[in-house]
Image (spheres, rainbow, N blue to C red):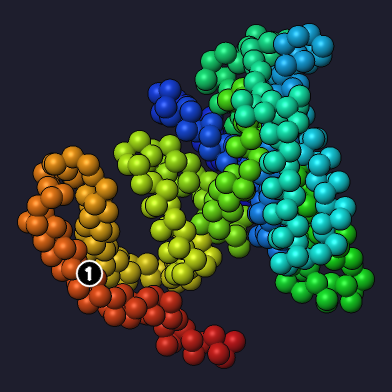
Amino acid sequence: MGRLAIWIVFGVVLLVLPQIFDSVLSLSIFTQMTIAIVFALSYNMLLGQGGMLSFGHAVYFGLGGFLAVHAMMMIEFETLSFSITLIPLVGGVFGLLAALFIGSFSTHKAGTVFAMISLGIGELVAASSLILVSFFGGEAGVSGDRTYGPPFFGIDFAQDDHVYYLAAAWMFLSVLCMYLFTQTPAGRMANAVRDNPERAEFIGYSARRVRFISFAMAGFFAGIAGGIFAVNYEILTEENLNAATSGRVLLMAYIGGLGFFIGPIVGAVVLTLINSLLSNYTDLWMLYLGILFLLTVMFLPRGLTGLLMMHRVAWQLGHMRLLLLPYTLTAIPGAVFVLGTIAMIEMSHAEETEFVYMGLALSPEGYGSWALLLGVTAVAFFFLRRTLPRLREAWSQANTLPRLQRHEDGHL
């Protein structure tokens, strides 16, 4: 019953978001999030659940999107006649077909060999997209028009909110289906093959077949994401197939947290916000994204979701109050240190004689501004280091059972 309530809340949130944030920019960002969520979760089916590191997952996203655009063009020229609401399904079917073909030989291997095969396939398809101009359109890509075809209950999807609700509906259905897949025997065995393929083989399961099923389903949902992308942007180019897109979905899944189903959703939301909002304020947003990824790999191997789930024990014990003050004392110098570091990075990149940062007028050519930032950052780092021992002690207390309760549990 609790899981049903979560899905109901999830659906309600998707419905009311455009009512709360009704600007054009907000609708655009929300639609981008739906695409990123489906794409990231499809990648999680490979790496997070099946243990298959892929450097070419954009192939299925891009191929599904290209066929979806061609289907839109056929609707426009009245070669086909069906609702635009089915375009994401067209992309999913083509992504599935591509995954069935590529997976028929790539899933025979695992680990590094599989990763290299996926990289080779990705580069091959990306290069072919510039050669096979009749299908991929060359460097200009191919474009369609989503307003053609039979209206869906009077909706022709000319408005941004109509596109959002279509994307949200397909995203909700895709997320639900991918979650249900994790509960099936195939989904459970994918986890077993990821953790111990030899043992899975010993009890009678084919590790290659299990990987193939997960691979095919991941390609299907990646194609659906490509179809939603085609409906939203009405154009597909070589960029949607290349290694940069494959790398982007890896960042989404890893930063969000591969060990949790909700992890890629968190990563997709975070990276979409970084791409859509942070890029409006600085040209160095890719640098900050790279730093975020490095910090995640070094200190949060289970991602942002793993960081939240680390507090589950303290929450169940009712000890979260023990962490409130230590977190506050650590967060203040930590925030000052981060802001000071960002200010120095931005000031080194600034071309103007005066650089305004958070209301402060700084001079990139003046020693005084650099001395001020270095001093503030150094002091913040000093106090940050001083607060860490107290935070560790509080963390240990918050995650430890009281002595009396440990004694009673021991008797039980």
Q: Secondary structure at mark 1?
A: helix
In-image side of 379 versus 67 (left or right): left
In this rendered view, identify the residue nearer to me: 232 or 9: 232
User: Which quadrant of the rendered structure holds the C terminus?
Assistant: bottom right
Give the residue drawn at x 75%, y 65%.
Answer: 113
Q: Tell me the kind of residue under disc 1.
A: Phe
How packed mark 1 is, by other alpha carbons closer than 10 Å (few <14, some 14-19, many 20 or more), is: some
In-image side of 327 versus 380 (left or right): right
Rendered view: 2 above or below 379: above
Q: Is residue 328 visible?
A: no
Image quadrant in which you'd find residue 214: bottom right
Q: Residue furthest left?
A: 368
In-image side of 362 versus 266 (left or right): left
Give the residue drawn at x 48%, y 46%.
Answer: 271
Image quadrant in which you'd find residue 353: top left
Expressed as whole percent of the image width and height from the top left, the position of residue 266 reads: 51, 50
Expressed as whole percent of the image width and height from the top left, the position of residue 274 reads: 42, 44
Give the residue drawn at x 73%, y 38%.
Answer: 128
Rendered view: 234 above or below 52: above
Q: Which residue is mark 1?
A: 381
Expressed as whole percent of the image width and height from the top left, the position of residue 395 reads: 37, 76
In this rendered view, identify the residue nearer to me: 80 or 185: 80
Counting the numbered discs, the total is 1
Q: Residue furthest right?
A: 204
Q: Is residue 412 visible?
A: yes
In this rendered view, identify the residue nearer to me: 42 or 342: 342
Expressed as whole percent of the image width and height from the top left, the position of residue 204 reads: 92, 71
Give the residue drawn at x 13%, y 41%.
Answer: 354
